[in-house]
Amino acid sequence: MKKWIALSLLLLVGLALLAACGQSATSVAEVGGRRVAVDGGAYRQLTASQLQAMLEAKDFVLVNVHIPFAGNIPGTDLAIPFNEVSRRADLLPKDKQAKIIVYCRSGAMSAVAARTLVAMGYTNVWDLAGGMNAWQRAGFSLEQDRP
């Protein structure tokens, strides 16, 4: 009887945690991204594999911030140089809670862009760790057409 009560209690706690999180399978994978604290908030880094999975049910703006142009990840919506993100705010979603994923060639420029977006008040910013280099190492291809 005690085993049944303990098992029931464990099951209830697990269900309560799942309900509290309210996350889909995609968002659970996203939460696995490394949180990077910066002035004004934080952004998350994601892997090439996580980005590939998220592209299947795309619900975000994908921004190439690399200069000079060196190709795009398929599904890229915008190309904004990392050092012009704040000046080109008119191209970005007006909703500060919109999910925005930035990338560059190696991850250095996109980290600057992610910090800038957070400083601008965006709360759902993601950065592709390792950039297009990591994307290609994971076996994914680049496009040469500009968005």
Image (cartoon, grey):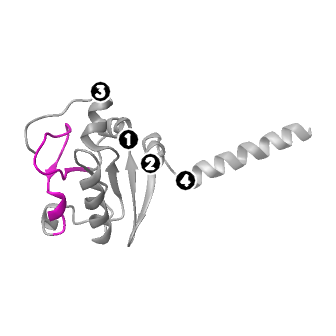
In the image, farthest residue toward the right: 1
Cα separation between marks 2 and 1: 7 Å
Pointer 2 or 1: first along the chain: 2
Helix, strand or loop at label 4? It is helix
Circle 3 residues within 10 Å: few <14, some 14–19, many ≥20: few
Picture coordinates of residue 34, whole percent (x, y): 45, 51
Nearer the N terminus, badge 2 or badge 4?
Answer: 4
Q: CA distance from mark 4 to mark 1?
A: 22 Å
Tell me, for residue 33, which label it has, or none.
Answer: 2
Q: In the picture provided, is 36 more to the left or to the right than 105? A: right
Name the residue carrying label 1.
Answer: 47
Q: Main secondary structure of the magenta part?
A: loop
Q: Position of 125 compared to 24: left or right?
A: left
Q: Are marks 2 and 4 in contact (CB under 8 Å)?
A: no
Q: Assign a secondary structure to mark 3.
A: loop
Dot label at residue 111? none
Q: Residues within 10 Å of mark 1 (few under 14, many from 20)?
A: many
**x then y, percent, for residue 143:** 14, 34
Q: Which of the image's four quarters has the N terminus?
A: top right
Amino acid type, mark 1: Thr
The image shows residue 145 at horizontal and vertical percentages of 7, 38
Q: Which mark is residue 21?
A: 4
Residue hosting label 3: 139
The answer to which of 48 and 28 lies nearer the viewer is 48
Residue 103 lies within the magenta run: no
Q: Earlier in the sequence, mark 3 or mark 1?
A: 1
Determine contact: label 3, label 4, CB under 8 Å.
no
Q: Are marks 2 and 1 in contact (CB under 8 Å)?
A: yes
